[in-house]
Amino acid sequence: MAAVDCVILGLAATEPASPAIFHYAHPRSEADCVVASNINPYLVDAPNIVLLARSRPLCRVPEIGIGNKPIDGGYLLLSTDERRALLARDAGVARFLRKWVGADEFLNGEDRWVLALQHASPDQLRGMPDVLAILEQVTAFRQGRIDAKNGRKSKAGQSSVALAATPTRFHVTFLPTSNYLLIPRHSSERRSFIPFGFMPPDILSGDANLVTTTATESDFGVLQSSMHMAWVRNTCGRIKSDFRYSKEIVYNNFPWPDTPSDASRAAIEAAAQAVLDARAQFPNASLADLYDPRTMPPPLVQAHQALDRAVDAAYVAGELAAGRKKPSLRTDAERAAFLFTLYQHYTSLLPAAASGSTRPRRAKATRASADSRQT
């Protein structure tokens, strides 16, 4: 049952006169052969570019980070049944229980809960014996002692051991006070779009997601477009063949539309809201259901098509305003080739010392607000 990808390389001493790229709409479909001017390391007809990990976005867009990372051995995370049993013994624990979303919970609509005890006072903790017992297990896990929940000895790193002295704290903490955009780091390759979404502050995200409190609906719209997905398919990591979205390679290197006008932003924002409205028409469906190619509802398909038109128009307008030729964006291959070329243009504007740096200075990115600062 192993999932294996086989890559066959043909090597020659000279370059072919007409290098060709074979595109497949589906693994079992017939190949569409396109003669390329250059095949870059990402197998795209575009300049030879190798993306480096960037600590900040290439463009003037919100910075993102990971969600909460407890390093707790799973003891602070509760299923619905475990939560119900805990509250039956001590109803006062309810004030410290928050809904929790990892990538699976976000995509599949599953319920999970977390004990968020960062602001619990010593006397409040002393009054919750069941919680104290959980904290003892967290401490033992972080110290590398026996992990009773998983039936084995825990593998505690140096950072985990240091955290053992403060079992109510997470290794990375993200406690927002406003809505935030959530990006799951892992998603099925079968989807035409990786579903992103806005979350309320009372729901805590795990580190299986990337998050930011400063993204607008216009930002959401660009990230949910076919333009961004063409970039994702060619640059993201993989687990089996599924997407592994990253901050440093995928998001921070993504070339956004060049100085979009207010009208372009408004059009993208309206189309993005239409996508959210189309999702809301099916409150009982999970995002996994909504974005399964077999079950994606027509209103959502149409909303994404309208969003693509708005995002494509913003890119085209940016190219024309800069005096460059109008790009062809009919296929994923064309989108990817255009984005790599646009990336090359953006990075060519960087100072020479910074053009290959992991800390680009083309534009200062918007910093997350103080309430979302990670510790």
Image (spheres, rainbow, N blue to C red):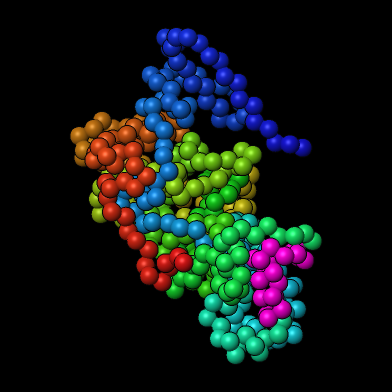
| Quarter of the figure with residue 311 | top left
The answer to whether one can see residue 112 in this image is no
Magenta includes 13? no
What residue lies at 39% left-to-right and 60% top-to-bottom? Answer: 215
Residue at the far right: name it: 151
Residue 138 spot, x, y in % from top left: 67, 70
Q: Which residue occupies the foreground of this view, 185 or 168?
A: 168
Q: Is residue 139 magenta?
A: yes
The answer to which quarter of the image holds residue 285 is: bottom right
Instruction: Name the residue located 68 percent from the left edge and 80 percent from the top edge.
Output: 131
Horizontal side of 266 relative to 116 (left or right) equals left
Is residue 364 shown to the viewer in this render?
yes
**Image coords of residue 204 (percent x, y):** 54, 68
Residue at the image position 74 percent from the left and 72 percent from the top: 81
Q: Which residues are magenta?
A: 131-150
Q: Residue at x 50, y 58 (%)?
A: 66
- Identify whether 260 is placed above or below 143: above
Q: Give the overall secondary structure of the magenta segment.
A: helix
Q: Percent from the top left, x then y, of residue 323?
A: 20, 34
Q: In front here: 327 or 131? A: 131
Q: Quadrant where the N terminus lies? A: top right
Residue 221 % position (x, y): 41, 52
